Amino acid sequence: MSDKYIVSARKYRPSTFRSVVGQQSLTHTLKTAIASGRLAHAYLFCGPRGVGKTTCARIFAKTINCEHPTPDGEACNECASCKAFNEQRSYNINELDGASNNSVDNIRDLTEQVRIPPQTGRYRVIIIDEVHMLSQAAFNAFLKTLEEPPEYAIFILATTEKQKVIPTILSRCQIYDFARITVPDIVQQLQYVCEQENIEAEPAALNVIAQKADGAMRDALSIFDQVAASTQGHITYQSALDNLNVLDYDYYFRLVDTFLAGDVMQALLIYKEIRDKGFDSQFFINGLAQHLRDLMVASTPQTRKLLEMNDEVAQRYGVQSAKLAPAFYYRALDLCNTCDLNYRNASSKQLLVELTLVKLCQLVVAPQPQQAAQPPIQKIAPKPAQPAQTAQPQRPVAPQPTQQAAPQPQRPAAPAAPQAPTAPHPADSAPKAAPAPGATGQRPMAYALGNTPRIMVNVPNVTASQQPANAGNNVPQRTQPFTAEQMLAAWQNYIDQHPQERALCTTMSYALPQPGDNEEHYVMVVGSPAEQKSVEEHKASLVQFLCNDLKNDRLTLDIKVSEVPIDTPKILSPREVVEQIKQHNPEFTRFLKDFDLGLA
């Protein structure tokens, strides 16, 4: 080996603002400040790891000391100051690691160095990396120097956790927030590295590396070196998946196809195939949730730009997302999120994931046609007066030859099959012959039975008050048996759910129901007629609540006044409470006297 190997993260570390990846707006602001000479005495660079905080701090320190900066605000790399910086022998730039130099003594040594002016160049720059690791005492010792440093001193603080820096430090700095680097920017930089290193790489493989880096350029270059070393300079999509232990998104596309088809067995087989490859089930369910999120994003052109992937894969997401309804994404994402939350506490984690897949397969399957399209069958209750009328011997069963023959041609023909009685036809309103004696208030009803002639039967009008309560309603009466303990539990449930009815709940708390004549009859014994009247006012809602709770509509409740006086709990006033405490505890009386306490 002729040349010593240098990892890509160090070899391709940016040395100019122009080469910084993914921070164009921030670097433009810094270059503008340098060009205009509007430099602050303290800066705070904060953001995720590997996004260029320390790199920008070094470039900024080199540029402000450059003797001949370029017109666009970059360092010339030709002057003595730039050469000293590039060769790492510049005395104008001091770097301090806040994690290992976090004591008060380290900060005191730093403030002593700040007092020495630069020998060459214009500024003395102190870079403190991981500044949030300083102790509280070190922060306090650093405050005065940070607020009023010498005119030639500039502090640049870098941290990944801005919330841990005390507010007094934040108020003395200009804060620059570094953003995560996007996947397209990382892929573009990796393609540049491939060109410089003569490495062949598939775009899909670089996209996998960029997504694995999670917005950190340094991590992306480290992963790139790992994959390039194992593939001998030819990076394929499959080799990237194998080296990084990343699950191929093709599995997720196949799973969504099984959800569309409602194929539970195939979904379980794909999940087994994933487990056999050694992937963790929670990692799989999180990847499935991410895939569903990407499908939802790809479903509309407005949000498709949120996909961080190449155009070929994005087009595949768009094709599959067109097959799904928006409601599917919401329910599917909720199921995946619930599975992820319950995964840690689940005793059978495999069963939890399989149950989630079963539910996902049922989201798209349409209900059975006979359940969705067929309306509920309504049964018509028989008229209670009908048997009595047909049983009367004096009523003629055959039609009258003269009196009722006239209106019959005006009636429509009767159907061949039996049907329910319908509303009177307008033709029936024509003048008819006088009704038979005793038929006042009765209306005619026609019945058609097969091919037999119609028979006119007079049925008396039944008012609403005379009809049974369940007439026209086919809901069966609930008759589930219950015990006395279940009755008391339902009784207590009413008290707990109706705290606003204080008087009734107070009465119910001591006047518990007692079994009556049968298992479905109970008696409530109260202490006075006033309480009886109060309970009677709420009896209907109380009984209805008990029937619903016990699932028995035959429950009855009687309210009676006790013949023997009942010791009901008395509500004491604050003064009566104090007097009772005095009677039972003499020490309380001395306590009130010593501290001169009493009721107003």
Image (tube, rainbow, N blue to C red):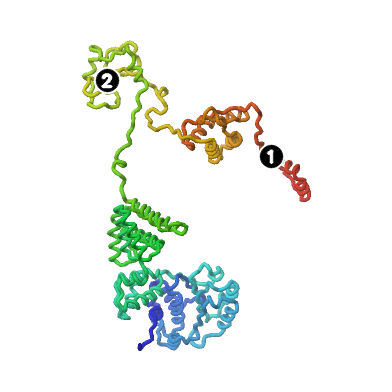
Coordinates of residue 9 in the picture (x, y in percent): 40, 78
Question: Quadrant of the rendered structure where residue 66 is?
Answer: bottom left
Q: Mark 1 — residue? A: 573
Say which element carries label 1.
loop
Decide which of 173, 95 is in the foreground and name it: 95
Q: Nearer the viewer, residue 116 or 8?
A: 8
| Labels 1 & 2 near each other (Cβ < 8 A) | no
**Point 78% across, 50% down: residue:** 594
Q: Which residue is mark 2?
A: 428
Q: Amino acid at mark 2?
A: Asp
Image quarter hosting the N terminus? bottom left
- Judged left or right of residue 37, residue 587 is right
Comparing 488 with 8, the one in front is 488
Q: Would you say residue 453 is visible in this rendering? A: yes
Earlier residue among tags 1 and 2: 2
In front of the other: 141 or 98: 98
- Picture residue at 76% right of the left edge, 49% below the top: 591
In this picture, residue 302 sits left or right of residue 541: left
